[in-house]
Image (spheres, rainbow, N blue to C red):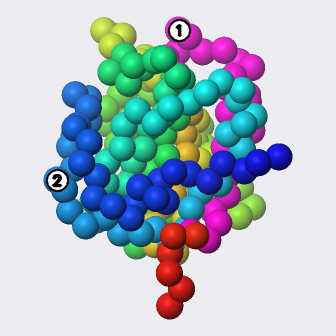
Amino acid sequence: MRIHTAIIVAMACIVISDGPRASAQPFAPRHVPTPDMAMAWKQEKDSRKWTAAYKAGNETRIIMEFVPQGDDIEAWKELVIHQIDFTPRSLREYVDAWKAMLVRADPKIKITEEKFEDGSFLMTFESITPEHQSDEFCVRRFIKGSDGIYQLAYSVRPSLKKENIVKLWTEILTDARLVPNPQKKSK
């Protein structure tokens, strides 16, 4: 079984110059560090083709978003997000800050959290907004690397959520792991 190592590794080696999405804050073009690690996950478990629809990076964050082939990132229905935040914060501090941010955005949000033996976290949240324009169900894995917090997430609009797909992506996220970045030069 082939392991999908995130394209984010190669992306991190260059300055990102794609135009910003309307729903995302643009990153000013700057130096983008090469991450120490790469996140590996079994993308092929989901037989659909996913395409990179958005990417951005700077000295504090790298993010790449994938949608099913043929979907539009501006009107996404399902989304896979790979994100690296370069931070010295502990994983516990980071996850708590992430949850606080979610609660500030939606005080009625439903959040569950599971801590794994390796110290990583799997968080599930569902947010239903009154106008239904930003409704989201998300399963997100947080793993502490030597240079920051690595994340992999599956998001879907709650009205389109299929339990078998959520279960599949929960398995993919649970099995995801950090591996040495093949683009990183040894010291």
Q: Main secondary structure of the magenta part?
A: helix
Q: Is residue 166 magenta?
A: yes
Question: Disc 1 versus disc 2: distance between alpha carbons?
Answer: 35 Å
Q: Looking at the image, which is closer to me, 57 or 7?
A: 7
Position of 62 relative to 159 (above/below):
below
The percent position of residue 158, horizontal first and vertical second, equals 52, 15
Q: Is residue 173 magenta?
A: yes
Front of the two marks 1 and 2: 2
- Residue plotted at (20% across, 62% down): 30
Residue 98 visible in this rendered orientation of the protein: no
Please state the extent of the stretch shown in magenta in the rendering. Answer: 156-181
Position of 185 relative to 143 (above/below):
below
Please rate how many residues cluster around mark 2, counting C-alpha atoms within 10 Å: few if below 14, some from 14 to 19, many from 20: some
Give the residue type at disc 2: Ala
Which residue is identified by label 2?
A: 28
Q: Secondary structure at mark 2?
A: loop
**For the image shown, how many numbered marks are present on the structure?**
2
- Residue plotted at (56% across, 51% down): 6
The percent position of residue 7, horizontal first and vertical second, equals 51, 51
Please rate how many residues cluster around mark 1, counting C-alpha atoms within 10 Å: few if below 14, some from 14 to 19, many from 20: few
Q: Looking at the image, which is closer to me, 107 or 54?
A: 54
Which residue is identified by label 1?
A: 159
- Precedes in sequence: disc 1 or disc 2: 2
- Residue plotted at (74% across, 20% down): 164
